[in-house]
Image (tube, rainbow, N blue to C red):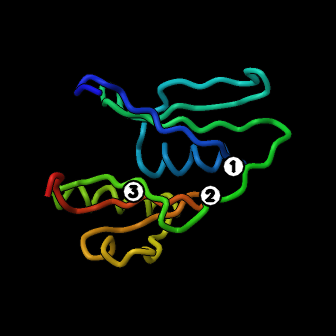
């Protein structure tokens, strides 16, 4: 692995449209690419242009995936600037996504946790990394 490595986090879903609303509309990630009926799969890649990471969500037609295995399956975004963190939290709430109590109380101290339609959670953490 090198600093130039791009990370893709991929997971299947039964709720592609709902996830698009959560990650695109709520979190403000950009649609980087999408596809329909590629060998029975539909999908979308979301991220920020130029960022070394992105997310891929796929739906396999005719298959059921189910929910996240636990409430502690997290994506954590570190937003050290208080104003930018508040804007990110307000954007989620403006799109109808209310914070949920975190399974691990640590994340509630400096962050807000939101749950997507599949039960996976995103923490908007008002802190810098590395700590």
Residue 91's disc number: 3
Q: Are marks 1 and 2 in contact (CB under 8 Å)?
A: yes
> Helix, strand or loop at disc 3?
helix
Tell me the residue that label 2 is attached to. 117
Which residue is pictured at 52% across the width and 63% down the height?
115
- Dot 3 or dot 2: first in sequence order is 3
Q: Are marks 3 and 2 in contact (CB under 8 Å)?
A: no
Q: In whole angstroms, how far apart are the C-alphas of marks 1 and 2?
A: 7 Å
Q: Nearer the viewer, residue 1 or 13?
A: 1
> Helix, strand or loop at disc 1?
loop
Measuring from the top left, give residue 128's x and y in whole percent. 16, 55
Q: Nearer the viewer, residue 2 or 131?
A: 2
Along the horizontal axis of the image, is 92 left or right of 44?
left
- Dot 1 or dot 2: first in sequence order is 1
Which residue is pictured at 42% across the width and 49% down the height?
27
Tell me the residue that label 1 is attached to. 15
Q: Nearer the viewer, residue 68 or 17?
A: 68
> Helix, strand or loop at disc 2?
loop
- Dot 1 or dot 3: first in sequence order is 1
Locate the N terminus by quadrant.
top left
Looking at the image, residue 108 lies above or below residue 38: below
Which residue is pictured at 45% across the width and 75% down the height?
103
- How many residues crowd around disc 2 within 10 Å: few (fewer than 14), some, or many (20 or more)? some
Q: Where on the picture, by quarter, is residue 51? A: top left
């Amino acid at each position: 692995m090198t600093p130039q490595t791009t990370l893709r986090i991929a997971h299947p879903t039964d709720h592609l449209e709902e996830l698009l609303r959560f990650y695109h509309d709520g979190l403000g990630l950009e649609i980087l690419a999408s596809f329909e009926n590629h060998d029975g799969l539909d999908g979308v890649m979301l991220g920020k242009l130029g960022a070394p990471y992105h997310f891929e969500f796929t739906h396999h037609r005719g298959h059921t995936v189910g929910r996240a295995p636990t409430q502690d399956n997290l994506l954590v975004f570190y937003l050290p600037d208080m104003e930018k963190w508040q804007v990110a939290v307000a954007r989620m709430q403006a799109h109808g996504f209310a914070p949920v109590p975190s399974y691990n109380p640590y994340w509630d101290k400096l962050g807000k946790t939101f749950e997507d339609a599949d039960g996976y959670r995103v923490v908007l953490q008002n802190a810098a990394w590395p700590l």
